[in-house]
Image (cartoon, rainbow, N blue to C red):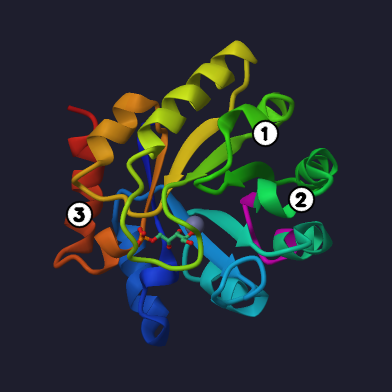
Amino acid sequence: MNFPIIAPSVLSANFANLEADFKMLNESEAEFIHIDVMDGVFVPNISFGLPVIQAMKKLSNKTFDVHLMIVEPQNYIQQFKEIGADILTVHYEACTHLHRTIQAIKNAGMKAGVAINPHTNISLLEDIVADIDLVCVMSVNPGFGGQSFIENTYKKVEKLKDLITKNKSKALIEIDGGVGLQNAKQLVAAGANILVAGNAVFKSENPIETIAQLKLVSRN
Ligand code: DX5
Ligand code: ZN
């Protein structure tokens, strides 16, 4: 794979014209499309749900990277598979039986991810990291696009990279929140494989160019 993978977050897209934004994404170098599902319980915001993602799926063949910011995510695994999720990420903080939930996601035929909030210590992933395909390190408190990046994230990414190596895990490291041209390079240097970017892409003058630059800036 050609790292870093860029995963634009459609939370910052124009919901009144998703077709135009997906056309842009299809023409861009973005490999993943990051889809934020919020329930108003786990996070203090509500985004969109299954029927909207099902409609989005018709607009692109790219990898759908679905980030569930919901309680009881284990109850919806099959439904997310059916509407076309390729990667399904659940929050560490939302799962009492995380191991079981991860196995269920994989058994349903999706890649399994675990997201951790800014306060959650990397060491808590020690006994699950070998079983997962992706760790999403939240670099803002989840719930909203356009927030400022939390600087402590670099340290967490380095620790996570160590943990992944020690446990012979194949998990990819994804960074989510406040990512842009100003921090992409340092994040990749710390060990990030996937960069989620909402506002940095969709609020820029030339989103296709911004996506290309996010890939480039972090390679040099
Ligand atoms: C935050 C979401 C993010 C968000 C990122 O809760 O998980 O994916 O859309 O948006 P930016 O890049 O604008 O911080
Ligand atoms: Zn997200």
Query: What segment carries the magenta color?
Result: 81-89
Query: Which of the two residues, 41 or 209, is positioned nearer the viewer here?
Result: 41
Q: Residue at x 72, y 30 (%)?
A: 128
Give the spatial CA distance, label 2 vs label 1.
14 Å
Q: Provide the residue designation for mark 2.
A: 95
Q: Earlier in the sequence, mark 3 or mark 2?
A: 2
Give, as a three-letter code, the residue at label 2.
Cys
Q: Which one is in front in this view, the residue at disc 2 or the one at disc 1?
A: 2
Callout 1 secondary element: loop
Q: Quadrant of residue 5?
A: top left
Q: Provide the residue designation for mark 1.
A: 132
Q: Provide the residue designation for mark 3.
A: 210
* Side of 54 where 187 appears, left or right: left
Callout 2 secondary element: loop
Give, as a three-letter code, the residue at label 3.
Thr
Q: Residue at x 42, y 82 (%)?
A: 15
Which percent across, then down, holds residue 68? 63, 60
